[in-house]
């Protein structure tokens, strides 16, 4: 099951378990810890007293009491001391042991705060990297819906260089409606060119005709009937063909795409199923398709990539840079207030 970043109050998350960024005493404190204790009520504190504290990097579990969550998993993150005092190892342990406890208690949905990124001073971008790497590794072998819950935008931070690079990429490609309209007309012309007769291809290994300075129509020398056959492919059929061509297992693909197994099953068993655009793109990312291959897959679902959309430009940025990590992409999409990939 997938891993999502959401902006919410963790005490209001309707999940099987929420994770509390606690202190060693487990007796409550400020920030997320205090908010969870207040929302859960005094019974939580009474049960926490019976646990006799928790070591840094370890985790304990209690009932959720007045919270929507059935359980609270308490974990103690490290205080940041420059990064040379085992902080990363301890923070990784917080996430891993919390997830193992959730699994032991048969939790299907878990919500985490960004552990140690508040008063404990762990740099937010580094804390986020640890969270993503540890959770995504766990989900490779386990079915669980995991959330990172961000209370406000200031609580979330990715690399400033990455943000700057993406902003520049957006600025370089964002176009106004006039150019979009023109590009759409050229796209239609390109499609007309691509259904020319066999005679038009005779004696040619390939044809490249520039339509503008940056648009080229390429007609490779495959038999025309092969193209016609592929035109009849549905999104589901093309997706399954691509998975087979990549030598992937179905489970590898949908997990890498951050897609729920049940949704993948629907797509697989209904060749006329039309996914959402973020879902279609998530599969293109999982398959590590090129930009042109991604556009081809999207067309089967009735979508296109456009330089009039910030979401589309961010997707293009990651594909051009050959970064096919769906969690890295979702971090950037969240930073720019865009829909996330997967579900």
Image: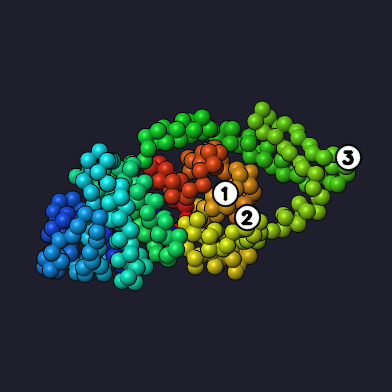
Q: Residue at x 51, y 43 (%)?
A: 323
Q: Nearer the viewer, mark 3 or mark 2?
A: 2
Mark linked to residue 152: none
Q: Is residue 251 left or right of residue 147?
A: right
Q: Residue at x 28, y 56 (%)?
A: 94
| Circle 1 Cα neighbour tier, 10 Å, few/some/many (<14 / 14–19 / ≥20) | some
Q: Residue 246 is drawn in which quadrant?
A: bottom right
Residue annotated with mark 3: 203
Picture coordinates of residue 99, whole percent (x, y): 33, 62
Q: Is residue 31 left or right of residue 295?
A: left
Picture coordinates of residue 155, whole percent (x, y): 28, 44
Mark linked to residue 246: 2
Between residues 188 and 312, which one lies in front from this camera angle?
312
SS state under label 2 = loop
Q: Are marks 3 and 1 in contact (CB under 8 Å)?
A: no
Which badge, 2 or 1, comes first in the chain's sequence? Answer: 2
Name the image colouring.
rainbow
Residue annotated with mark 1: 288
Between residues 227 and 211, which one lies in front from this camera angle?
227
């Amino acid at each position: 099951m997938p891993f999502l970043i959401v902006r919410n109050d963790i005490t209001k998350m309707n999940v099987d378990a929420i994770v509390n960024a606690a202190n060693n005493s487990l007796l409550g404190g400020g920030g997320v810890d205090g908010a969870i204790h207040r929302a859960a009520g005094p019974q939580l504190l009474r049960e926490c007293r019976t646990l006799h504290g928790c070591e840094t990097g370890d985790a304990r579990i209690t009932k959720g009491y007045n919270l929507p969550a059935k359980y609270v998993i308490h974990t103690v993150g490290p205080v940041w001391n420059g990064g040379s005092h085992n902080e990363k190892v301890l923070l990784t342990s917080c996430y891993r042991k919390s997830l193992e406890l959730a699994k032991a208690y048969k939790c299907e949905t878990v919500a985490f705060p960004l552990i140690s990124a508040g008063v404990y001073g762990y740099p937010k971008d580094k804390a986020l990297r640890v969270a993503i790497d540890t959770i995504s590794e766990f989900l490779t072998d386990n079915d669980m819906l995991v959330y990172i819950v961000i209370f406000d935008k200031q609580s979330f931070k990715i690399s400033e260089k990455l943000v700057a690079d993406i902003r520049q990429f957006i600025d370089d490609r964002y176009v106004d409606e006039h150019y979009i309209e023109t590009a759409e007309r050229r796209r239609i012309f390109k499609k007309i060119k691509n259904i020319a007769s066999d005679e038009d291809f005779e004696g040619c290994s390939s044809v490249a005709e520039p339509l503008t300075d940056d648009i080229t129509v390429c007609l490779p020398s495959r038999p025309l009937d092969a193209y016609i056959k592929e035109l009849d492919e549905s999104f589901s059929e093309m997706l399954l063909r691509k998975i087979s061509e990549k030598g992937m297992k179905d489970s590898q693909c949908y997990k890498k795409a951050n897609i729920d197994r049940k949704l993948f099953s629907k797509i697989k068993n209904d060749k006329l199923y039309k996914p959402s655009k973020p879902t279609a793109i998530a599969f293109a990312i999982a398959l590590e398709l090129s930009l042109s291959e991604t556009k081809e897959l999207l067309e089967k679902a009735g979508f296109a990539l456009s330089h009039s959309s910030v979401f589309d430009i961010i997707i293009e940025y990651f594909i051009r840079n050959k970064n096919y990590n769906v969690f890295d992409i979702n971090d950037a999409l969240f930073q720019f207030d865009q829909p996330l990939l997967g579900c």
